[in-house]
Image: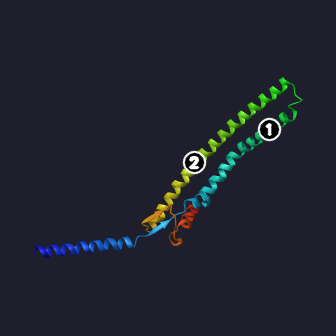
């Protein structure tokens, strides 16, 4: 009797393990290329355009300031021997102040730009993850990966995600 119960138990375990193995063999995988999403998706393109528009005026001001600095430096180099000590010191001081102001503005510009990019990128990533989850649930994917060394094109769902992000506006 014990042998029979044990045999039935072993058979049941074998059946369960085969079902579990069969279930893992039919796992549906998907892949999303995150870099492509950040380059090509409609929200990413719109965010980049907004950033360029919002920061273009400051960028132009920095470029103008850089040209002024360059011109003042050339003037100092060309007229260095012709200028008196007090005039040379005044121009050098003016150049140093302008240079400090330029570097400060440039640093602030980079910090503001990076902060804005990071905020926009976080928003895009959040929206993208929601879309990926909707696609995965709708098409019954078991696993969706975003980073891989190699991906077979048949499991790449990046185009679906791009389309969904574009349609979502």
- The image shows residue 105 at horizontal and vertical percentages of 69, 37
- Reading the image, the residue beneath label 2 is 118
Residue, x 55% and y 59% (percent of image)? 34
Q: Residue 110 vs residue 81: left or right?
A: left
Quadrant of the image for the C terminus?
Answer: bottom right
Among all residues in the image, which is located at the extreme left?
1
Among all residues in the image, which is located at the extreme front?
81
Quadrant hosting residue 81? top right
- The image shows residue 36 at horizontal and vertical percentages of 59, 61
- The image shows residue 10 at horizontal and vertical percentages of 21, 73
- Reading the image, the residue beneath label 1 is 68
Query: Element under label 1?
Result: helix
Quadrant hosting residue 55? top right
Q: CA distance from mark 1 to mark 2?
A: 31 Å
Quadrant of the image for the N terminus?
Answer: bottom left
Q: How many marks?
A: 2
Front: mark 1 or 2? 1
Dot 1 crowding, Cα within 10 Å, few <14, some 14–19, many 20+: some
- The image shows residue 50 at horizontal and vertical percentages of 65, 50
Q: Residue 86 vs residue 143: left or right?
A: right
Would you say the residues marked 1 and 2 are in contact, meaning their CB atoms lie under 8 Å apart? no
| Sequence-earlier tag: 1 or 2 | 1
Dot 2 crowding, Cα within 10 Å, few <14, some 14–19, many 20+: few
Up/down of 52 relative to 61, above or below: below
Please tell me the numbered disc located at residue 23. none
Quadrant hosting residue 153? bottom right
Q: Nearer the viewer, residue 112 or 49?
A: 112
Residue, x 81% and y 36% (percent of image)? 73
């Amino acid at each position: 009797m014990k042998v029979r119960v044990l045999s039935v138990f072993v058979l049941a375990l074998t059946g369960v393990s085969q079902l579990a193995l069969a279930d893992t063999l039919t796992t549906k995988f998907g892949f999303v290329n995150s870099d492509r999403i950040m380059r090509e998706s409609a929200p990413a393109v719109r965010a980049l355009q907004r950033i360029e528009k919002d920061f273009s005026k400051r960028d132009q001001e920095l470029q103008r300031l850089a040209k002024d600095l360059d011109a003042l430096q050339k003037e100092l180099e060309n007229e260095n021997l012709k200028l008196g000590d007090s005039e040379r010191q005044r121009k050098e001081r003016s150049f140093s102040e302008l240079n400090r102001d330029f570097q400060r503005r440039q640093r602030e510009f980079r910090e503001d730009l990076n902060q804005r990019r990071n905020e926009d990128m976080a928003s895009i990533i959040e929206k993208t993850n929601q879309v990926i989850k909707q696609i995965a649930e709708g098409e019954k994917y078991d696993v969706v990966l975003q980073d891989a060394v190699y991906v077979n094109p048949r499991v790449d769902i990046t185009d679906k995600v791009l389309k969904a992000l574009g349609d979502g506006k």
